Image: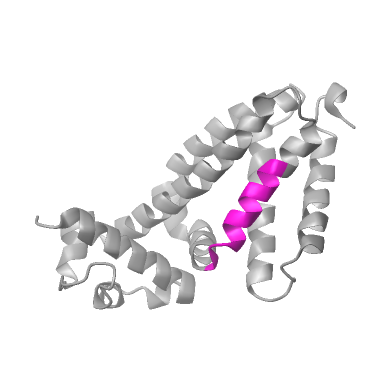
Amino acid sequence: MKNESIIREALIKNTTRLIGEGGFEKSTTNAIVHDMTHAPGIKLNEVYIYRIFGSKERLYADGFAELDAQLFTTVDAALVVFERKDIEVRECLHILFDHLWRFLLGNEIKTRCYVRYFYSTYYREKSHREHRKKLDAAAQRFAPAFTKESNVHALLHTVFMTMLDFAIQVHNGDLEDNEDTAYHIFNLLYHSLYCYLREDLRN
């Protein structure tokens, strides 16, 4: 299909925006193909969704997969510091927090879309397994800082979910976007992780 990669990218961007702005009820197939500003000069109808993705649900899942990949690219960039010996673990955790926090606050529509999809039935049906692989890979890099008995996968998952919740509160205007908010959230997370850290790394 001519221009398939351009059309695919445009459909995913439209879907992400619509879910982020108004939820799944706003992301109808008609609405998704209506605005093609990401692919100027191309006119589409709803058939293209099924030609490229097979179903609207698969389109949703592929959109989430792109967001998930962006999030874990951010995580991977931050986890590099855990391999260094000259930085205390609290500072390593703060770097991880800061990378994630700036990503979530800098992308309101993406963050809202991510949360809405994650808590939907589509996630369990289409995306849980691939997300789990990414989380497991990140947890393996995260694990050396924690005791052998710790469930590092669960700890990292809790960090993600807590930060997503607070980010949505900021986007909703329930929390201020300032240094004090970030400081208090980081301290909450750090103290929740503290008892799982290797004893020699606690400070």
Whether the magenta-drawn stretch holds residue 122 is answered as no
Q: Main SS type for the magenta part?
A: helix
For this view, does 173 lie left or right of residue 76?
right
The x and y percentages for residue 199 are 87, 24
As drawn, 168 above or below 86: below
The x and y percentages for residue 3 are 14, 57
The x and y percentages for residue 45 are 16, 73
Q: Is residue 97 visible?
A: yes
As drawn, 85 above or below 162: above
Q: Which residue is found at the position 82% from the left and 51% from the top? A: 188
Could you tell me which quadrant the C terminus lies in? top right
Whether the magenta-drawn stretch holds residue 98 is answered as yes
Q: Is residue 54 visible?
A: no
Q: Which residue is found at the position 57% from the left and 34% from the top? A: 138
For this view, does 12 lie left or right of residue 75?
left
Total number of numbered discs in the rendering: 0
As drawn, 105 above or below 23: above
Q: Which region shows up in magenta?
A: 95-108
Between 25 and 34, the one nearer to me in the picture: 34
Q: Residue furthest front?
A: 86
The x and y percentages for residue 160 are 63, 49
Could you tell me which quadrant the N terminus lies in? bottom left
Question: For residue 64, what is the image quadrant?
Answer: bottom left
